[in-house]
Amino acid sequence: QVQLVESGGGLVEPGGSLRLSCAASGSIFSTYAMRWYRQVSGEQRELVAAITSARSTNYADSVKGRFTISRDNAKNTVYLQMNSLKPEDTAVYYCNADVKIRTTLLRGDYWGQGTQVTVSS
């Protein structure tokens, strides 16, 4: 009923920038918190950044001052601007959203398929 599609990943050199996008579509009544997670193979998925519908944000300590999360409520889209990228930022980045479904008015937690970000020279 709800699909999250990420885009914007790729290969970038250390110090470079990337912008990730995640668009939610389907039978959406309302979108609440939206988040970006990342996961390195063999490790636990970690929260990178989150933003509420009122645009209150929080970040992992490791990305504060380098990453910026934002959203366009009209488009049900969340963005992650990543600057000053480091090799340790290399991971698969996943979008997550708390969504109320139009047909049932039930809230659920939805995930995108992930997009690879590789920081390497």
Image (cartoon, rainbow, N blue to C red):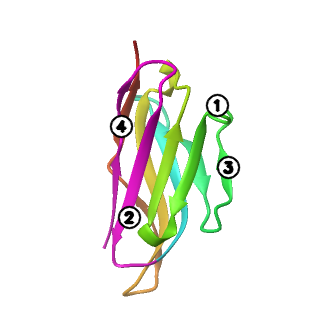
* Distance in Å between CA atoms under marks 4 and 1: 19 Å
Residue at screen point 44% across, 26% down = 90
Label 3 secondary element: strand
* Distance in Å between CA atoms under marks 2 and 4: 17 Å
- Circle nearer the N terminus (2, 1): 2
- In the figure, 31 relative to 112: above or below? below
Residue at screen point 64% across, 62% down = 55
Amino acid at pointer 3: Asn
The residue at which mark 2 appears reads as: 24
Magenta stretch: give its range. Answer: 1-29
| Residues marked 3 and 2 touching at CB (< 8 Å) | no
The residue at which mark 1 appears reads as: 62
* Distance in Å between CA atoms under marks 3 and 4: 21 Å
Amino acid at pointer 4: Gly
| Residues marked 1 and 3 touching at CB (< 8 Å) | no
Is 99 within the magenta? no
- How packed mark 1 is, by other alpha carbons closer than 10 Å (few <14, some 14-19, many 20 or more), is few
- How packed mark 2 is, by other alpha carbons closer than 10 Å (few <14, some 14-19, many 20 or more), is many
Where residue 61 appears, as percent x and y from the top left, is 68, 35
